[in-house]
Image: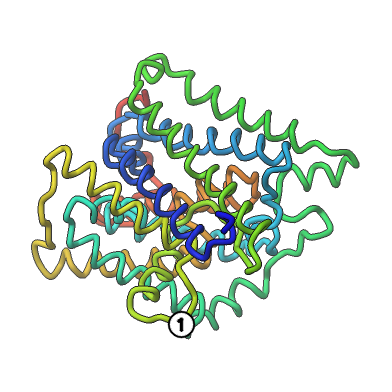
Amino acid sequence: MDLATSPWFLALAGLCAGFVLGYAARANRFCTMSALERYWYAGDSRGLRTWVLAAAVALVATQTMQALGLIDTGESFYIRSDFAWVGAIAGGIAFGFGMALVGTCGFGALVRLGGGSLRSLIVLIVLGLAAMSAQKGLVAQARVALSDNFAIDLSERGGQSLGGILSSIVGMDLSIIVAGAVALALFGWIFANTRYRREIGSIAAGATVGLVIAFGWWATSYAAANSFDVVQIEAGSFVVPVADTILQIITFTGVLPDYGVGLVLGVVAGAAARARRQRDVRWEACDDARELSRHIAGGVLMGIGGVFAMGCTIGQGVTAVSALAISAPVVMLSIFLGARMGLAYLIEGSAFGAFRSPSRQPAE
């Protein structure tokens, strides 16, 4: 039997990729929320640079494979779908606010769960249920009315790809030039900091995350080209796949787990392996009802916001960036704003504090 035609290929590929992702993230404390908090309040940009490095590496690897004809990100929903700008902004803000309430995103919750965090288990269950509702349930009706109906059709401009849009305007293929320019800008900012150039562990972590995301594009594209079944072209996100994982656990409809489900389970397994090796496994629960309610609220906001925005800090912040989707900067800026508002609410007592400059040292 050919590997790609195996019904378990996608799940196993996702499981392996997720294991590497979870292990690397746990070993190097890769967390977008923590990176933003340290950047805003401590002037430490190392975590943020590592996250941007992951996006830059994923971009280079993905666009290289696309130029070689190994993958086609244009078949992914990041590029093929209409640009739902209302959902990108509103959903991004909601996701960011929820991320601040929880202290991490969906990916970070999976990494923490691998170390024994029962708080993260609650967050993931709530996030998954909220994502189901926003994708297929009652909340989905509001999503269609408030977001999908106002989406912009960019199909005549090559979809949501920045390279495709500019190529359509100019009348010649600029995809490689655009990808190269974006990558150079990202790498220029990342390594402009002298201190960061010595952070070998952080650089390795960022590169690993980026390469794993690129691997996801290859694995799903390879399966789509060789399998008799319809395969969704994806690379990594942690909102809808969390919901899909819950459904796979509680019911069986004859549909085997896909790449996203394998990725989710693999992240937990990889993080658990690293936590065990570090002897850092410990059960953690909410201290009181107030903390529990904050985590539940954060899970709801991330689940609904992530579906509206069509991604999370990994889905839009790394995967969509690697495909040069124009939704990525819109969603990520919205997530940053939501996270800043959430932190202001928790630390300063008012979300409006987000519109005041935080007191911190100059960023490193």
| The C terminus: image quadrant | top left
| The N terminus: image quadrant | bottom right
- Determine the residue positioned at 77% across, 59% down: 154
Which amino acid, mark 1? Answer: Thr
Secondary structure beneath dot 1 equals: loop
Looking at the picture, does residue 126 appear above or below residue 155?
A: below
Question: Depth check: 241 or 167 in front?
Answer: 241
Q: Quadrant of residue 199?
A: top left
Question: Depth check: 356 or 316 in front?
Answer: 316
Relative placement, left or right, of 268 versus 96 is left
Residue 330 x/y as whole percent: 58, 51
Question: Depth check: 151 or 196 in front?
Answer: 196
The residue carrying pointer 1 sits among few (fewer than 14), some (14 to 19) or many (20 or more) residues within 10 Å by Cα, namely: few
Residue 72 x/y as whole percent: 70, 49
Relative placement, left or right, of 274 versus 72 is left
Looking at the picture, does residue 185 appear above or below residue 345?
A: above
Relative placement, left or right, of 335 versus 163 is left
| Residue under label 1 | 253
